[in-house]
Amino acid sequence: MKRLGILISGRGSNFEAIAENVASGALGVLGVEIAVVISNRAEARGLEAALARGMNAVCLPSKGLDREVYDRMLVAELHKHDVDLVCLAGFMRLLSAGFIREFPNRILNIHPSLLPAFPGLDAQHQALAHGVKITGCTVHFVDEDLDAGPIVIQAAVPVLDDDTEETLSARILKQEHRIYAEAIGIVIAGKYRVEGRRVLLT
Ligand code: GAR
């Protein structure tokens, strides 16, 4: 199980961090390949980055399409590229039950908070608004509920008194780039088991 399908909607910095790790880090040593990068938005910067790296980059616009119909298109594209593990990297859409059934325990997501705190949109804004002193990021398996599947890795990030959404997001993003590749490595190497909600490293 080594072929990644990466789904993005925008900037694509998590995709790029994964690509760097595949090119010259632990994921490369494990023989991981990025089979395809798919964006649901044509203007996503990550698509250009994928093309510049000579990767398969596919734009599948989702606007105006029924969720089930769109997800079937996504699934077909991922199977076409023989994808083993799907990585959501700033992919700002909910996945249908049909999609999730196609890749059981083989979809990962990164979220910029310590889940279950602050799911959904604008997690960094939510953290500042709530006044927490520590937030962070989470890589988790995707199930049918929003930002809710079993957690593979988390990293904590302190909230500083003079933080703005931008400065806090930037510090969280650094940790996202580190833990996403690490989580993918654990899953690809099969060095884990899932017991209920817990992902235990083996
Ligand atoms: C990242 O901070 C990611 O955690 C977040 O979107 C950003 C995408 O950045 N995802 C979510 O909020 C999902 N609920 P990127 O396109 O540069 O990787």
Image (tube, rainbow, N blue to C red):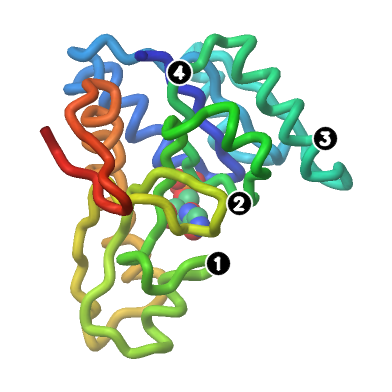
Q: Residue furthest front?
A: 196
Mark 4 or 1: in front is 4
Residue at the spot 20% in from the left edge and 33% down from the top edge: 192
Q: CA distance from mark 3 to mark 4?
A: 21 Å
Is residue 52 shown above or below 107? above
Q: Are marks 1 and 3 in contact (CB under 8 Å)?
A: no
> Callout 2 environment at 10 Å: few (<14), some (14 to 19), or many (20+)?
some
Asked whether mark 2 lies closer than 8 Å to ligand 1, one says yes
Q: Amino acid at mark 1?
A: Leu
Give the residue at mark 2. 92
Mark 4 or 2: in front is 4
Earlier in the chain: of badge 1 and badge 2, it is 2
Is residue 22 shown above or below 172? above
Q: Are marks 1 and 2 in contact (CB under 8 Å)?
A: yes
Q: Position of residue 47 (x, y in %)?
A: 59, 30
Quadrant assignment for the N terminus: top left
94 with respect to 67 (left or right): left
Residue at the spot 19% in from the left edge and 64% down from the top edge: 156
Q: Nearer the viewer, residue 140 or 122?
A: 140
Q: Amino acid at mark 2?
A: Met
Q: Amino acid at mark 3?
A: Val
Is residue 174 visible to the viewer in this orientation of the structure? no
Q: CA distance from mark 1 to mark 3?
A: 24 Å
Earlier in the chain: of badge 4 and badge 1, it is 4
Earlier in the chain: of badge 1 and badge 3, it is 3
Q: CA distance from mark 2 to mark 3?
A: 17 Å
Earlier in the chain: of badge 3 and badge 4, it is 3
Give the residue at mark 4. 84
Give the residue at mark 3. 69
Earlier in the chain: of badge 2 and badge 3, it is 3
